[in-house]
Amino acid sequence: MARGEIELSKLTKQFAEVTAVDGINLQIPGGEFFSLLGPSGCGKTTTLRMIAGFEQPTSGQILLDGTDVAYTPPHRRNVNTVFQNYALFPHLNVYDNIAFGLRRAKRPKGEIRERVGKALELVQLAGYEKRKASQLSGGQQQRVALARALILNPAVLLLDEPLGALDAKLRKALQIELKSLQQEVGITFLYVTHDQEEALTMSDRLAVMNGGHIEQVGAPQDVYEDPETLFVADFLGVSNLMEARVVSAGTEACRVAVDGYELETRGTNQDVIGAAKIVIRPERVELEEHGAPPGPNRVPGMVERLVYVGSAVQVIVRAATGETLQALVQNKGTGLGFEQGTPVQLHLPPDALRVLPSGIGDEPSLKGEEGQDAAEEAEEETAAAT
Amino acid sequence: MYRRWLWPSFAFPGVLWLVLLFVVPFYAVLGVAFGTVDPILFQPVPIWNPLNWNVGWLTEVINRLAPGGIWFDVGIRTIVYVALSLGLSLLIGYPVAYYTARHAGRWKGVILVLIILPLWISYMMRMLAWVNLLQADGYVNRFLIFTHVLSQPRDWLGGSASTVIFALVYGYIPFLILPLFASLDRIDRSHLEAARDLGASRWSAFRTVTLPLSKTGILGGAVLITLPMFGDYYTPNIVSSSPTTSMIGNQIDLYFHGGPQPTIGAALTIVLAAFLTILMLYYMWSIHRAQREVGAVGAL
Amino acid sequence: MTAVAEPRATPRSSAFVRIRGWLRNPWGKPRFLVLITWAYILWSIVPVLIAVQFSFNATRSRTVWDSFSTRWYWGDPVDSVWHDPTLRHALVQSFKLAGADVLIAVPLGVLLALGLARWHGRGSGVSNFIMLFPLVTPEIVMGVSLLLVFTQLFTFIHTGTFAQILGHVTFSISFVVVIVRARLFSIGRQYEEAAADLGASPFVALTRVLLPLLTPAIVASAAVVFAISADDFVISQWLSKGGPTDTVPIQIYAATRAAPLPSVNAIATIMMVSTLLIVTAGFLTWRLFTRGERRTGTAAEDFGGAFNIS
C-alpha cells in the first residue's frame, strides 16, 4: 500500500471575499519529495495548513492514503509539520520537545528514551537534550523541529518554508541534508517555498501555484525547460520573453515571426495562433561572433552590458528584433570574447525555444497581486486572531 | 482546531460578572438620577422604566452647574485645577520621559524602575507624605524659613488652590510619564539622525520629528490622568481643609455621604460621566489599538 | 561631520559661563534634562522615604524627628499598629480584600482574556467594549454606581466586606485581561498548532502548552491586582460599612484629616512594603519565565503594560 499518498480534490478555501485556494486538484504518490512553489499569497501555505488540519476547507477533499481527512482535527491526522518559525515549545527542553508527541501517544518511558535518542542522532544533535530552544542556533532549532515531527513516523511530513530564516550558506547546506534525509526516511515530504532555486534543487516533482490555482505540475527539469504558461516561464529563472506571431503551429515544430525574423521553435500541444510569446532560457542562448555565417534562428544584436556573477557571465544583448535578451555564458577561464557595445550574433536553437499562448497568465503578478495581498492579509489576520 | 463554542464560553463568566456588577450598576445610577425622592423618608425612589424617567433632578443639577448656579464656581474650578495640573505635569513629565527614553544610556533601567516605583506606592501614602511635610512645623516650612524665603510658617493645608494643584500633579504625574516614555522610546533613532543629517538643529529636530511622533503618547497620557482627576475628591480633602477648593467630586461625595440626597448625587454623576464620555471613548479606542499592535507584531 | 568648534578663547571664563557651557554641550547629553530627571526622581521618592522614616520616630510627632524606635509598629501598648485594633483591622481588611481580589479576578480575567482574544463571532465586540469600560471609568462613578446598585437593586448585598470584594474584582478583571491578552498576542497560535500537530487534544494543547506559556502574564497580573486592590480608596470607602471594614487607605485618609500619630505612617509603610515585595516577586517571575525569549524593550516596560496605552 502506498504510504503517504496525498490527493487533493477540488480543494477550495475562501476567506471573506478572497479565494485563497481555488479548487485545486493534485496527486502526490507516496515517498516523493514534492514542493509547492509560488509567490507570496498564491495559496501554497493555505493549502499546506489545510492538509495539516489548521484550516478547514470551504469545499473539496483531502485524501490521505485514500481517506478523506479534510474535517479530521489535526491531532488525529497522521501528518506532521515543520513550522516556518519552528514553534519549538519554549518552556520545554530539546528532549521534551522531541518526546512531546510520543508522550501524547502514551508510549512507555523506555521506548520514548530510545526513540528520542535515535531521532537526535538522525539530525546530528546527540547530546543537546537539556538545551532550551533559545540556546540553539537557527539551524539547530530547525533540526529539532524535524526530529520532533519525524519521530512520530507520519505518513507525510509538511514543511512550511523551513529554511526561510537562515542565511544563504546554511540554507544550501540544509537543502542537501533535507533531501538526503527524505531519501533515507522514505516518507512523503510536502515542501512549501517561494524560492524557485530551492524547489528545483530538492524536489522530485513540484507544483507551481499562482493566485490560488496550480499552473503546472511536473519534475523540476520539465517545469523549468518546458513551461506551459507565461507565469511558470517567468517565475522560474529568467525567461527571455519575446513577442511573436505564429506562422504555423504543430506538435513537432512551430514557426513564428519576430519582427521580420522567422524562427523555428519546439512543437507544442497547446493551441497557439496569432499573437504569442516565445521563451528561451539564458543558458541556451548561443553567442556567435558578429559576421559569423548566418543561418536559421539567428538574430544580430548588440551587447549592452556584461554582468559577472562568479561562475558565469550574464551577457545582456539588445537583439535586432527590439527585445533585450540575457545570455548566460559559463566562466571557462578563457575570457568572454565579447565586450560591452560590440555587435554579436545570437543563435536561438529551435529545441530551446518554446511558444506560449499570449493571454494565459498575462501579467500574472499584477492581475493576481491585489488578490494575493488580500489573501495574504486575510491569512495573517486569521493567524493573529484565532 | 478548537470547538466554536469554546472561546465564548471562556469569556462568559467574566462578561457576566461585568454585566451584573458594572453595566447594571450604571443603569442603577440612571434609575436613581431619573427617579424621584420619597418626600417623607427622603429616600431616593428609582424609576427603572426609561419611558417614565423624571428629568427634574437632572435639570436641577444642570441649573446648578450653569452660570449663576451654586455649582458653577465648583465646575469652573475643577476644570481649571485639572487643566493646570495637566499642564504642569506635561511640563515636568515630558522632559523626564524624553531623557529616560533617549539619553539615559546605561542608567535607563535604573531610572525606569525609579519612575515606575511611585505607581506601586499607595496614592494615600504619597499624599500622607506631603501632608506631613506641609505641616506648620513640617520640613517644608522649616526649610523655607531656614533659607529666608519665608519669615514665618505658612499654612499650606488650610485651603490653598496651589497646594491642591501641587498635590494633583504629584499624585498623577507618574501615570503620565509612563505612556509618554513608551511612545518616546518607540521612536526610531534613525528618524532623528536623518533630520540632523539633513541640517536640522537639535531643537528643530525635536520640534519637527520627536514632538509629532510622540503625540499619541501625550494624548494618551493626558487622557489617562485627566479622567480620574475630574472625579477626584479625596485629594482636595486631604491637602485642604477649606471648602473653597472643592471640586466636582467633592459635591458628589457630599450628596452621598454628607447629607442623604443620593438622587442629586446620582444626577451629578451622570452629568460628570457624560462630560467625560468623549475622553473615555478615546481612551478605550487607544487601548484597543495598542493591543492590536502587539498582536500584529506577535503574529510575524 | 565638520570639525568641532574651538571653545571660545576666554582664559578667565567666569563660573557662570563655564556652567552655561557645561549645560549647553552640543555633542553630549543635554544636561538640563539630566537635572530635571534626577530632580523629579528625588522629588517623587524622598517625601515617601521621609514618611517611612518618621514611622520609626520615638515621639508622637510626624514632623520633628527624635530618635529611632519601633514603638508605632509594636512597641506602644495602645497606639501601635499591633495593639491598636482600628489599625490592625484595617491592615487585615486590606490584605483580605487584596487576597480575595486576586483569587477571584485572576481566573475570571484569564478566561476572559482567552475568550476575547480568540472569539470572533457575534457579541465579541460588545464583550470587548464592556471589558474596556472599567479601565476608563473614573472611580467615583464606579463607587456611586456600586453603592446605588447595592442599596436600590441588589439589596440582598449590604455594604461591607462582601460588597467591597465584589467591587474590587469588578475593576480588577480588566487589568488582568489587558496583561494576559497582550502576552497571548505575542505568543500567537503557533505553539498550540504545533501541539495539535503532534497529537495533543485541544484540552492538552491548552493546559500543557498555552497555560505554561501564559504563566508569567498570569503571575504579573496577580501582582498588579494585589497592588491596585491594596491601593484602592474610593471603592473601598464607598462600599465600607465603617469599623473593621475600613482599609488602610481609608485609615490614612481619615488620619490626614485629623491629628494622626506616626502609627499611620507605620501602617502605610507596612502596606507599601508588602505591595512592593509582591510586585517585585511578580516582576522577577516574569523575568525568569521569559528569559529565553527575545523581547523588545526592557522587562520593566512589559510589566508596566497595564498602564501602557500608546
Image (cartoon, helix red, strand yellow):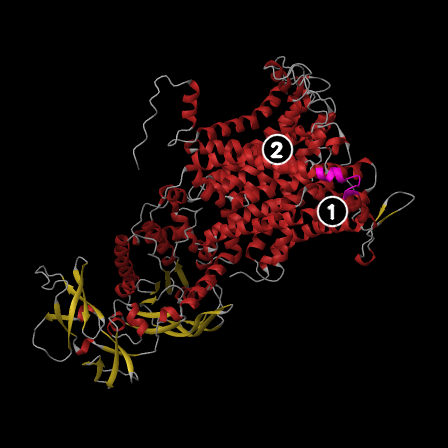
Left or right of residue B74: residue B126: left
Q: Quadrant of the N terminus of chain C?
A: top left
Does B60 lie within the magenta span? no
Q: 10 Å neighbourhood of mark 1: few (<14), some, or many (≥20)?
A: some
- Label 1 sits on what residue type? Val
Q: CA distance from mark 1 to mark 2?
A: 25 Å
View extreme (right): residue: B40
- Label 2 sits on what residue type? Val
**Image quadrant in which you'd find residue A248:** bottom left
Helix, strand, or loop for circle 2? Answer: helix
Left or right of residue B29: residue B95: left
Left or right of residue C117: residue A183: left
Q: Residue at horizontal 62%, vertical 18%?
A: B139
State which region is magenta.
Answer: B64-76
Q: Is residue B252 visible?
A: no
Q: Which residue is mark 2?
A: B169
Q: How many marks?
A: 2
Residue C71 point in image, percent of width and height: 66, 17
First of labels 1, 2 by sequence position: 2
Q: Residue at horizontal 67%, vertical 49%?
A: B277
Tell me the subunit letter for badge 2.
B
